[in-house]
Image (tube, grey):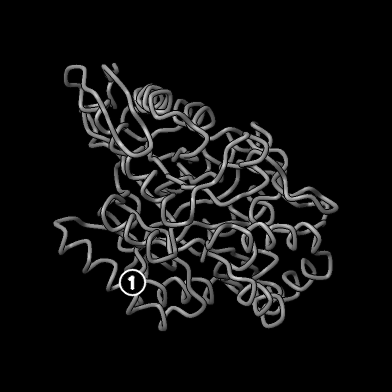
Amino acid sequence: MTLPRNPGLLGGNAFKLGLFGANCSGGLAFTTLPERWDSSWNNNLRLAQAADEAGFECLVPVARWKGFGGATNVNATSLETITWAGGLLASTRTITVFGTVHVPMIHPIVAAKQMATVDQIGHGRLGVNIVCGWNGDEFEMFGVAPDEHDLRYERGEEWWQIVRGIWSGGGPFDHDGRFFRFRGLEGSPTPYGGAAPPMMNAGASPAGRSFAVRNSDIHFDYCRNPEASAERVAETKSLARAAGRAIEVWIPASVVCRPTRREAEDYAQHCVDNADWEALEHQYRLYAGSAGSQSRSADENARNRRENPARTILGYGGSYSLRGSPDDVAAECLRLNRAGFDGIAIGFVNYLEEFPYFAQEVIPRLERLGLRARER
């Protein structure tokens, strides 16, 4: 029997689980601790197979081409995401594996062929994470000039239309747009089963969120407080429905789960005491200089560092943080779900060391809360 593509990712459990950033050295955490994440292929393979066995819905990589400097040069070693996805899809059974694509750096014709090939390998389990660009260091390395902020999403939408057009499997077609002009576009194979992979985007600005509403199946959003974000999440879904589309809203988050809340907070403080602040400050400067990017303002970053340093260090400079006992973490997942979030993409300090405890202790609690169905 042929499974539907991306089983369980869209629909399925009320609250879905993913892993985020494991393809990059250090993952989401800016710490100098010796146990910080080693993003070797063997570690990623073991982690993907464990997540697949535990029923996680997806793996989401960070597309990085250059590290952030500092004592550990966070994310300097990174596995390229499309080839990474192909290897993991060939070695897993049901989990969706995303490839993250930087629109300004990757040619759409090449990307369409790469992603269709990888989707064939995974029998319809590839997902696409589109990033429209913000990292000035990487633009400079590629010799590419960044667009003005809102134009990035116009480029991204045109890029995605070209890829989708190639995937449609029709005859050759021409494209005359603002950013791309092509003649005789075609491509084969198309994605597995003839349906396009689901697409996610994490644009937080008005232009970024509008892009997601028009194009994405999953929108990565950020929050400081779930209840304060409920209205925004509901609005995103309402705007998509008005456009005749359905969209899920997920949140990236760091997790520190230990038998007691005190143990979790002590370990988080240990990470702060051994933070790679130099690397994080460089990341902040890149965000602030990103031609109007609103995903991280200088004021927000300063506030995160002052008011919640553990969240700042553990979560790529300020993404949401779940810390505590298994009961605490499960309760936070319920809180996020009640605010409208459909899933969470998790970063650990050391994925392989911390994942088994999360799977053993937190997932059964999520099942008892009605957020996830029991594995049959």
Q: Nearer the viewer, residue 282 or 264?
A: 282
Residue 364 x %, y % = 44, 63
Instruction: Count residues near mark 1 (Cα–Cα under 10 Å), then give few for <14, some for 14-19, many for 20+.
Output: many
Q: Give the residue type at disc 1.
A: Val
- Which is more toward the observer, 230 or 358? 230
Using the image as rendered, state which of residue 45 and residue 248 is in the foreground: 248
What secondary structure is marked by label 1?
Answer: helix
At a point 43% along the width and 23% down the height, the residue shown is: 110
Residue located beneath label 1 in the image: 233
Q: Is residue 365 above or below residue 92?
A: below
Return the x and y of residue 207 as percentages of the image width and height: 38, 61
Which residue lies at the image location 68% right of the left edge and 45% below the top edge?
137
Q: Quadrant of residue 170?
A: top left
Q: Is residue 273 above or below residue 303?
A: above
Q: In the figure, is residue 99 to the left or right of 243? A: right
What residue is shown at x 64% (from left), y 49% (from top)?
136
